[in-house]
Amino acid sequence: MTFKKQISSKGLPIFIIGAGGIVNTAHLPAYKMAGFNVQGIFDIDDNKANATADKFSIPHVFGNMQEMLAHTQPDAVFDIAVPGAQTIPVIEQLPAHCSVLLQKPMGENFDEAKRILKLVRQKKMNAGINFQLRYAPYILAAKELIDQNKIGELNDIEINVNVYTPWHLWDFLFTSPRLEILYHSIHYIDLIRNLSGNPASIYAKTTKHPAMPQLASVRSNIIMDYGEMMRANILTNHCHIYGLPKQQSYIKMEGSKGAVKINFGALIDYPRGAADSFEYILMEECAQWQEKKIEGSWFPEAFIGSMEQVMLAAEGIIDRPDNSVEDCIHTMACVEAAYRSSEQGGIKPEVL
Ligand SMILES: NC(=O)c1ccc[n+]([C@@H]2O[C@H](COP(=O)([O-])OP(=O)(O)OC[C@H]3O[C@@H](n4cnc5c(N)ncnc54)[C@H](O)[C@@H]3O)[C@@H](O)[C@H]2O)c1
């Protein structure tokens, strides 16, 4: 598989819908780094829109969607980061043929994902989903080694997260019927698909935790089945309350000629985070583990990549975003399969 390098495409005017946490901490800092042209913002909460516009020097703040749409030209790129339930009503208001980046997940379940896909197809939009882990600088570095055939054919991907995530910070999670896979492991499912294509099937068990019984499942084991010769496993425990020493979060890829291990720090000691590291071994070169310094991280730098894909497609430089709704619907299908596998349960051992 060949992974396209990021190509710069900066000029198109971006209009943001939603001025909440993720826009302030990731979208706008990333766009500033990339030199993207953010022209306007709208939030149903005027104070948030104004505060965000002040902080990031955004020239236009709109009082409602109609005002925003009256101002935009056909080259506008919309960037929607509203709560999941608001995504479809916002898309419905956007003009046909427009370009738009939608925050993940793509709806709250597979039915909603299919409704989003249908709407985008009907309106002939150029639409991408913000599954941005694919574009984190350490992932781009690993893809470069894969592209250059330095680690050979991939036969093992393991993502292992053992951290404490303060889920109580997100009120909406207390009423959400689905939690860990839909809001978190979805990034890893999407990444594995991005590296290895669609799996033949999914096995999963997603589990609640006795200390937070009011929440849906908060820990997951997911096996993405790529046949006999490939292992792709995601293991997450967000309930490790026993301090930092044993907290870990890594992505390990093994190929026929080498391997990469990325320790990613975003989730460690949350929200403080820890440093990332990128280690690799190439058997045809020095056959020893080495460390490479990577500039930037998942938050916020990866957010450049997901927006850049939509802009490149808007300019006709690529046919469609790598993170298009047409591609990301398969990530949602995997999420649905994981929940269904977990509900169905495993094979019961015979009682003797
Ligand atoms: N890709 C990621 O890694 C990632 C990380 C965090 C959140 N998210 C997603 O981003 C979205 C926003 O999350 P957040 O943490 O910023 O939430 P938030 O609650 O902080 O912000 C949402 C904002 O949207 C505004 N809003 C609500 N309905 C609106 C509408 N119809 N039109 C305009 N504005 C509207 C709210 O007033 C609020 O300011 C969610 O869908 C969430 O799942 C993605």
Image (tube, grey):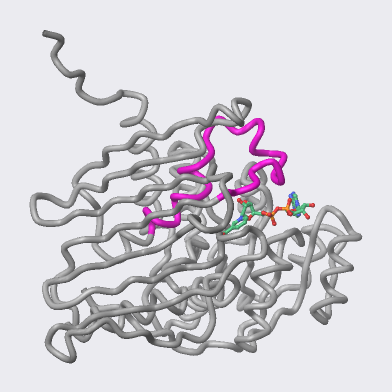
- Residue 44 coordinates in the image, percent (x, y): 82, 53
Report the front residue among 77 and 46.
46
- Residue 108 coordinates in the image, percent (x, y): 53, 40
Which residue is outermost to the top?
352
Is residue 184 located in the magenta-colored stretch of the structure?
Answer: yes
* Residue at the image point whose x is 16% and y is 63% from the top: 155
Report the front residue among 186 and 88.
186
Give the dominant element type of the magenta stretch: helix, strand or loop: helix
Report the front residue among 158 and 184.
158
Is residue 146 toward the left or the right of residue 66 in the image? left
Which span of residues is magenta-colored? 164-190
- The quarter of the picture where residue 313 lies is bottom left
- Residue 336 coordinates in the image, percent (x, y): 38, 38
| Above or below 169: residue 276 | below
- The quarter of the picture where residue 36 lies is bottom right
Quadrant for the N terminus, please: bottom left
Ligand 1 placement by image quarter? bottom right
- The quarter of the picture where residue 230 lies is bottom left
